[in-house]
Image (cartoon, helix red, strand yellow):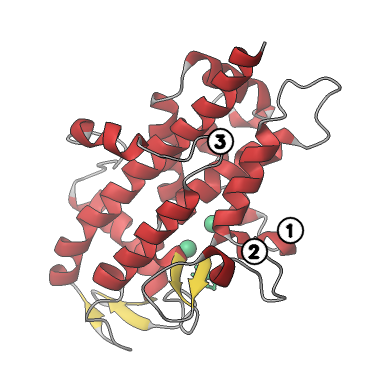
């Protein structure tokens, strides 16, 4: 997602944090966050060029198939296992479990939190689990209405921008209408580890069934595409927010239970 998408995901997450998790998040946030997790959620993208190693952690690609397989697909260009968005979510979750340890955790848990909050957002952007061949839609040139764009950017930014314009400053972080679904999204069978692998499987399916569907090089995407795809974007932002809160609540509530 772009900046707006990441902010929306984290604004939703903030609403679902338990008291313990909210306190731990406050403790870990840098001064510059102004007490809001959401302001720090786009941060990882601004570091993409400074933290070169972290660039592959924003996504995972498949060998042009509509399924995700961790051991096949979660690696960087040098073939190092776990260096993709799913591995990153699991890794930063593990790091955050050391919060409150004595002696003090050797990880920079402020960065762990900011990376985790960002990557839980990214794994829900369908094209962040896309085809290797087109780099998750980055090499598919399209027009978004009159404007030149690539398919990846349409899903990161353009659909969200168009919704905000159409509904005059409507933010997509209201959660109105999702209350019946929230419990179901939280239903993650994996007790200690995260369900990031499941979220990646959902994303590649949505990429195949919605993002890539009927799209060819240089196509113009307009109303037909917009009206059938923006509900998917809204749902993925809401799911990402709820699930980020779930992960943080698990990490920090567990800490309390341990002591
Ligand atoms: N770069 C290469 N593949 C990508 C993807 N699926 N998403 C974002 N950036 C990428
Ligand atoms: Zn992206
Ligand atoms: Zn990112």
Q: Nearer the viewer, residue 215 or 30?
A: 215
User: Label 3: which residue?
Assistant: 192
Q: Quadrant of the C terminus?
A: top right
- Image position of 118 with respect to 30: above or below: below
User: Label 1: which residue?
Assistant: 51
Work out how far the residue at label 1 is from the one at label 2, CA to CA, in angstroms: 7 Å
Callouts 3 and 1 close, C-beta under 8 Å: no
Comes first in the chain, label 3 or label 1: 1
Q: Nearer the viewer, residue 208 or 37?
A: 208
- Image position of 18 with respect to 1: above or below: above
User: Label 2: which residue?
Assistant: 55
Q: Quadrant of residue 136?
A: bottom left
- Tag shown at residue 184: none
Comes first in the chain, label 3 or label 2: 2
Work out how far the residue at label 3 is from the one at label 1, CA to CA, in angstroms: 28 Å
Residue 123 percent across, percent down from the top left: 46, 55
Q: Nearer the viewer, residue 206 or 14?
A: 206
Who's the residue at 73% across and 58% down the image? Answer: 51
- Image position of 107 with respect to 234: above or below: above
- Please give left or right for residue 39 compared with residue 219 in the image: right
Residue 21 makes an appearance in the image: yes
Who's the residue at 50% across and 25% down the image? Answer: 249
Q: Residues within 10 Å of mark 2 (few under 14, many from 20)?
A: some
Q: Residue furthest right?
A: 103
């Amino acid at each position: 997602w772009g900046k707006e998408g990441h902010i929306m995901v984290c604004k939703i997450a903030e609403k679902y944090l338990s008291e313990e998790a909210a306190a731990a998040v406050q403790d870990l946030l840098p001064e510059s966050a102004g007490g809001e997790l959401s302001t720090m959620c786009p941060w990882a993208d601004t570091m993409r060029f400074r933290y070169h190693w972290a660039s592959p952690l924003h996504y995972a690609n498949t060998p042009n198939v509509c399924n995700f397989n961790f051991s096949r697909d979660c690696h960087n260009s040098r073939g190092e296992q776990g260096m993709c968005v799913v591995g990153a979510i699991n890794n930063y979750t593990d790091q955050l479990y050391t919060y409150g340890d004595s002696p003090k955790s050797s990880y920079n848990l402020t960065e762990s939190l900011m990376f985790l909050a960002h990557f839980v957002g990214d794994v829900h952007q369908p094209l962040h689990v896309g085809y290797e061949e087109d780099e998750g839609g980055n090499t598919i040139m399209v027009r978004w209405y009159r404007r030149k764009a690539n398919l990846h950017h349409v899903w990161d930014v353009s659909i969200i921008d168009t919704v905000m314009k159409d509904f005059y400053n409507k933010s997509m972080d209201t959660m109105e209408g999702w209350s019946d679904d929230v419990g179901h999204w939280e239903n993650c069978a994996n007790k200690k580890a995260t369900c990031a692998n499941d979220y990646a499987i959902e994303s590649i399916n949505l990429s195949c069934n919605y993002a890539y569907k009927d799209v060819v090089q240089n196509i113009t995407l307009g109303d037909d595409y917009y009206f059938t795809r923006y509900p998917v974007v809204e749902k993925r932002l809401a799911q990402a927010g709820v699930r980020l809160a779930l992960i943080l609540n698990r990490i920090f509530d567990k800490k309390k239970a341990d002591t």
